[in-house]
Amino acid sequence: MPIKHSDEYRDAEISKHLANRIHATSTQNIRLMEVCGTHTVSIFRSGIRSILPDTIALLSGPGCPVCVTDQGEIDAFIELARQDDVIITTFGDLMRVPGSNSSLQNERAAGQDIRMVYSTFDALQVAKDHPDKQIIFLGVGFETTAPTIAAAIKSAAQDNVDNFSVISAHKLVPPALEALMGLENVEIDGFILPGHVSVIIGLEAYRPFFDRYNIPCVVAGFEPTDILSAIQMLVTQIKDKTPRLDNAYPRAVTNKGNTKAQDLLKEIFEIADACWRGIGIIPASGLQIRDAFAVHDAAKRFDVSVGSSKSLKGCACGEILTGHKTPPECALYKKACTPTDPVGPCMVSTEGTCAAYFRYHAD
Amino acid sequence: MCLAIPSQITKIENEIATIDVDGVQRQASLLLLEDAAVGDYVIVHAGFAIKQIDESAAKETLTLLKEAAALVENEGGDRSKD
Ligand code: SF4
């Protein structure tokens, strides 16, 4: 029987055994942060929280791309959508995120042409099909998504698809980890590092961060046994006081990562500062399009500046993304803010912590 | 947005792979991969294959997990032939 690389890692017996080992090892109270939104959802869906000992608190970090997109960036997207003769293309999750006074969904209802696409090449196809329009792709995401956007920009440049441009609001994970550790009152004892960001950047990309803070770090895959074995490694490291940078997802993550994707990123983008919801500006944590590809840079073409806007009133997304609060500690959670009528991005995005709590957390 | 489950490549044409996702055929660009072949399991993100699964690392992980859970003796040794 060939391995399917999914079912095998959902084995209930193995999960039970890993949970038992975690119970046996975990004596002190610890707080672990799962940085990635896909981990948050997987942890809830598989019921991992309910089989862990009370000594382990899991916090969701700044790893849901839509959630960390700053209010000012959302407002810039909406400003772009209001330009004449443009078609906005985006991944679906962004549609309902409230800006300061509108959302993309509202703009579409008001008649703007805003389309959800599955991949950046679909957006490029829209541009080829509508040479009389300007097609703008909203570039949101981490190191996993950014290469797919770089590939589209490169293709657009090669094929002279001059009516295709991207507004780059990409974010980078290692600088965000640095910024988190620099915040006041951080209480994080270990990190479950994202699986697919790490596929691209490789395990060694975290080495400078790890060397600086000497905090337990383990890259994890997305199946229950992947996450449990990462937690078990973290608990052991903490107990033995031997912090390490470990890889619990070796079938997909290598030390060097995907160098072809990294080269493409470097070709199209350069490192820039970026503004994160709830954290603010983090130096060298974003990507801007290089001047050589300025034709495809929507920020330059449409002269839209990404200003700083106030965060949404009463929404605690910022504190949730930094591990300072959990959703039930937000006064609006389940009251004014629900998935059908969300106030903040953490409730809008399927990878958002508030949405995951709402769907899976019985409280 | 993250499709965490690896999919198998069934066909490759002009750097576009046809992949099998639980019996449904979809397309994925191979522009971000160095060398992909039909039969490979790949991780797909937003329409792009971003990594082949390392079969030997996958088998090793499973063996370690199963050994740790003391399940391995029930499985027999047939996995090495796959
Ligand atoms: S429950 Fe709603 S308002 Fe509160 S932090 Fe989450 S998204 Fe924001």
Image: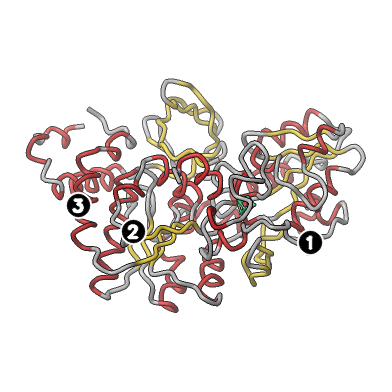
**Front residue of A26 and A143:** A26
Q: Which residue is mark 2?
A: A247
Cα–Cα gap, marks 3 and 1 = 47 Å
Circle 2: element type: strand
Residue at 48%, 44% in the rendered image: B50
In the image, which disc is placed on residue A118? none
Q: Is residue A132 left or right of residue A271?
A: right
Q: In this rendering, is residue A45 above or below A18?
A: above
Q: Chain of mark 2?
A: A
Residue A107 appears in which quarter of the rendering? top right
Give coordinates of residue A184: x percent, y percent. 55, 77
Q: Give the crowd class for mark 1: few <14, some 14-19, many >=20 residues within 10 Å.
A: some
Give coordinates of residue B23: x percent, y percent. 42, 20
Q: Is residue B10 left or right of residue A280?
A: left
Quadrant housing the N terminus of chain A: top left
Cα–Cα gap, marks 1 and 2 = 38 Å
Q: What amino acid is found at the position of numbered circle 3 in the picture?
A: Asn
Q: Earlier in the sequence, mark 3 or mark 1?
A: 3
Residue at 63%, 51% in the rendered image: A332
Q: In this rendering, is residue A44 above or below A35?
A: above
Q: Give the crowd class for mark 2: few <14, some 14-19, many >=20 residues within 10 Å.
A: many
Q: What amino acid is found at the position of numbered circle 1 in the picture?
A: Ser
Circle 1: element type: loop
Q: Which residue is mark 1?
A: A309
Labelled pair 1, 2 in contact (Cβ < 8 Å): no
Q: Chain of mark 1?
A: A
